[in-house]
């Protein structure tokens, strides 16, 4: 993977992949349920915090040019610590993508494949990512570069096509469940920006590592606008997402698009775009997981891992007995994983490593 | 070495072949279940109250093959079947078995509830239908003053060969007559759950069922009609004029044609409408005016006291439609007088309508609650105000600003 370097735009799209796929699933609904009418204020607040956070990550990583979080962990705590951090990130990527895949496939089963066993729907995605992962890493990135803007455009279209059904007054009461819930408990919505976990792994792959700050800020900025558009569409259109749990809320919004009597039922086009975006997301997360594994085990090639990781994703996604369990994971456990791993573990490693570096610098520069 | 590569290639191709076969087999069941040959497309669902707390559910199907045989000039016959069952889902299941095909709701245009059933509450049926991924949120909801089954039987569009085409466009006239709303199941479901509004449906009935002693031909009477009471006679046995107003999921009252126009004007869902206002120069005659909303109706809700105070400001431009001898519609003074008369008339109509929804129906079908939301800082504050119950205490102030511009082609006679 290190042979093929990532361009700036490709890197931005890479960070956007995670947020895009999660919004297709239940993320907008979860944000709405937690912040109600104050969702947009909450998202602006959260986005500002995440921009500051990503700026901090970039600043802290600057002292370890060309290294990712795994290398920095090794610097901080040696091989054992590197292995622990590596395994945590591998599990995080595999488990979160597997459960997200399961939930998405459950929705597809309800909508289009009522008689097909869920195993086959998931297996179709696994087949796609195993095939994609056999190609060069750039192949996935280039596809991602095409698909993510398409998804972003589809969400902008969804927003404007449904505008005539909006009730903008639903932004009130302005503080939703109160200031405490909006700004303090609402901090839980930081988990929406799980995509910044890729920032920890990007530096070794960037064509222009000096543009890391630009990549971080632009990708978080676009993610914030994208998320606000998604949530606004649901908030202004429906009164029921706050009280009623409905699968794939954005799909529900697509069903309302009607342009005259000729352009109706556009939801299938949206689903097609989202399915491809999902395959891209799975391919990228599994590739990152394999790269970490390769780094930990010092194996020469990733090729033998492709099918194993594919089967692992299939296996993990089949663990939940039903949609209720996988949905519970996505809505109740996944946010804590993001907060714990991306926002706590990652930044803690970077801060401690920087302190250690400073200490070592002081020791070496001290006259004997 | 070469043999090993060939063997490897064969094994790879065999694996791909097996995979393709497995996936074809796995997805064929879903494909077959959605195949057009195995589906019966429901166009209309009619739900009546049956015996012993059961539902009597009628399904009207499209018969594509018969339509094709008949050609484009012949009316396509539709098939209708009825089943009695304890719930809507059981009725669908029983009908699946009877038809030998799976009922598919993806082309269902209208869902009709009988007045009797709607009075008892229809949330269970609405939730069931919304839960079905095939039912479109744009399917219309009609509350029939007669039996839903009878309404379906009597509906025979005169100008459309395909009944599906008729149901696709039958609400279009609401934009220029204002006599019926475009009430959909998506909006209805939204309003059931909403804490700032209540649902409405189209009021349907039979044009053959006229009340006795309908003798008055007063021009205003034509705007006070609703389904089952119109002076229309025609081949289409059903008619849809008026609104069925709900409180939660229960039918609470009906609105006539003029009140429906008012509802649509307040909720900004009308492009133009015709009204008859008293002639300022002759008390016994009326002038027909086409009104076009100037912009969105401005609504201001004051919740500082326990009784909400609601100000409604609407503006219209008008064009005189009716003509008679000695019409002087180029005289600015006449147009000004007419505008003022129009204002007074509309203010009285709007006020009567608003108090009817508040005091009689106790139901905020206009969705004024959403304009009250910005008076509260938190959702809890709004919930404590208990808007939906408090709406019955509301007071209204209506301001109408009409400017009659001219007549149409003829300006003076």
Image (spheres, grey):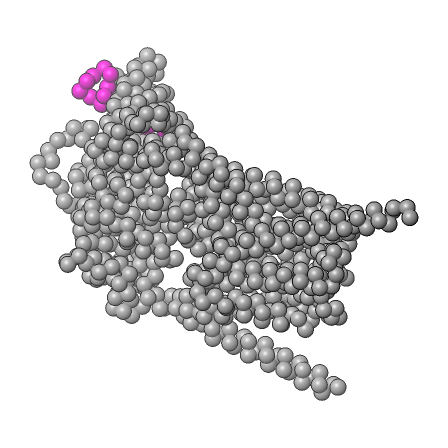
Q: Which residues are magenta?
A: B277-293
Where's residue B137, x and y in %? 37, 50
The residue sitting at 56% across, 62% down in the picture is A95
Where's residue B399, x and y in %? 33, 21
Q: Is residue A164 magenta?
A: no
Please tell me which residue lies in front, A143 or A245: A245
Please tell me which residue lies in front, B123 or A184: A184
- Viewport quadrant of the N terminus of chain B: bottom right
* Vertical side of A321 occupied by B282: above or below: above
**Left or right position of A116 against A350:** left
Where's residue B363, x and y in %? 27, 36
| Residue B307 picture quarter | top left
- Badge count: 0
Please tell me which residue lies in front, B329 or A275: A275
**Left or right position of B169 against A366:** left
The residue sitting at 34% across, 58% down in the picture is B105
The residue sitting at 69% across, 53% down in the picture is A349
Asked whether the viewer can see residue A256, the reply is yes
Could you tell me what secondary structure mostly forms the magenta stretch? strand
Please tell me which residue lies in front, B142 or A200: A200
């Amino acid at each position: 993977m290190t042979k093929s370097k990532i361009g700036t735009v490709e890197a931005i799209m890479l960070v956007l992949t995670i947020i895009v796929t999660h919004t297709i699933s239940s993320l907008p609904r979860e944000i709405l349920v937690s912040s109600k009418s104050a969702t947009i204020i909450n998202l602006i607040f959260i986005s500002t915090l995440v921009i500051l956070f990503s700026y901090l990550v970039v600043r802290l990583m600057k002292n370890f040019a060309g290294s990712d979080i795994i290398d920095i962990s090794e610097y901080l705590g040696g091989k054992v610590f590197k292995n622990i951090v590596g395994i945590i990130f591998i599990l995080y990527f595999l488990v979160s993508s597997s459960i997200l895949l399961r939930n998405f496939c459950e929705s597809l089963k309800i909508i289009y494949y009522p008689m097909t066993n869920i195993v086959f729907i998931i297996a179709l995605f696994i087949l796609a990512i195993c095939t994609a992962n056999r190609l060069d890493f750039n192949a996935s990135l280039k596809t991602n570069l095409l698909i993510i803007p398409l998804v972003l455009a589809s969400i902008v279209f969804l927003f404007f096509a449904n505008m005539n059904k909006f009730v903008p007054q639903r932004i009130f009461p302005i503080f939703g469940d109160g200031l405490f819930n909006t700004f303090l408990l609402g901090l839980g919505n930081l988990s929406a920006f799980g995509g910044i976990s890729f920032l920890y792994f990007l530096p070794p792959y960037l064509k222009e590592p000096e543009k890391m700050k630009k990549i971080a800020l632009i990708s978080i900025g676009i993610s914030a606008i994208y998320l606000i558009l998604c949530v606004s569409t649901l908030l202004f259109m429906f009164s029921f997402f706050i009280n009623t749990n409905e699968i794939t809320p954005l799909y529900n919004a697509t069903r309302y698009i009607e342009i005259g009597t000729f352009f109706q039922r556009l939801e299938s086009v949206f689903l097609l775009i989202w399915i491809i975006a999902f395959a891209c997301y799975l391919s990228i997360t599994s590739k990152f997981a394999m790269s970490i594994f390769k780094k930990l085990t010092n194996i020469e090639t990733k090729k033998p891992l492709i099918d194993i990781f594919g089967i692992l994703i299939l296996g993990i996604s089949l663990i939940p007995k039903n949609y209720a369990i996988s949905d519970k994971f996505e809505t109740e456990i996944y946010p804590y994983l993001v907060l714990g791993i991306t926002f706590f573990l990652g930044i803690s490693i970077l801060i401690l490593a920087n302190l250690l570096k400073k200490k070592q610098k002081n020791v070496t520069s001290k006259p004997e | 070495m070469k043999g090993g590569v060939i063997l490897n290639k064969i094994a790879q191709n065999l694996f791909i072949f097996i995979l393709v076969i497995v996936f074809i087999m796995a997805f064929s069941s879903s494909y077959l279940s959605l195949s057009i040959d195995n589906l019966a497309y429901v166009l209309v669902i009619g739900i009546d109250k049956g015996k012993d707390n059961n539902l009597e559910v009628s399904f009207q199907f499209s018969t594509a093959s018969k339509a094709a045989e008949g050609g484009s000039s012949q009316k396509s016959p539709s098939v209708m079947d009825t089943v009695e069952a304890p719930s809507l889902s059981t009725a669908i299941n029983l009908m699946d078995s009877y038809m030998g095909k799976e009922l598919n709701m993806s082309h269902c245009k209208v869902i009709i509830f009988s007045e009797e059933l709607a009075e008892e509450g229809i949330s269970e049926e609405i939730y069931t239908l919304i839960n079905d991924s095939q039912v479109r949120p744009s399917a219309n909801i009609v509350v029939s003053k007669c039996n839903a089954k009878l309404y379906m039987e009597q509906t025979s569009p005169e100008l459309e060969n395909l009944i599906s085409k008729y149901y696709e466009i039958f609400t279009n006239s609401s934009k220029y007559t204002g006599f019926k709303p475009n009430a959909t199941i998506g909006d209805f479901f939204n309003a059931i759950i909403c804490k700032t509004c209540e649902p409405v449906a189209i009021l349907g009935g039979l044009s053959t069922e006229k009340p006795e002693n309908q003798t008055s031909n007063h021009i205003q009477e034509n705007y006070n009609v609703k389904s089952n009471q119109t002076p229309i006679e025609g081949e289409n046995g059903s008619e849809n004029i008026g609104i069925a107003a709900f409180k939660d999921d229960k039918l609470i009252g009906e609105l006539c044609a003029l009140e429906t126009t008012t509802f649509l004007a307040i909720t900004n869902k009308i492009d133009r409408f015709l009204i008859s206002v008293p002639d300022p120069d002759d008390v016994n005659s009326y002038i027909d005016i086409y009104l076009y909303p100037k912009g969105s109706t401005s609504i201001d809700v004051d919740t500082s006291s326990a009784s909400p105070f609601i100000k409604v400001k609407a503006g219209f431009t008008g064009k005189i439609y009716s003509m008679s001898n000695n019409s002087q519609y180029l005289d600015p003074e006449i147009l000004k007088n007419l505008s003022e008369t129009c204002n007074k008339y509309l203010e009285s109509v709007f006020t009567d309508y608003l108090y009817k929804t508040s005091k009689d129906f106790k139901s905020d079908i206009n969705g004024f609650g959403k304009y009250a939301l910005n008076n509260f800082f938190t959702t809890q504050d709004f919930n404590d105000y208990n808007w939906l119950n408090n709406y019955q205490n509301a007071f209204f102030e209506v301001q109408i600003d009409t400017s009659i511009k001219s007549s149409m082609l003829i300006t003076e006679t």
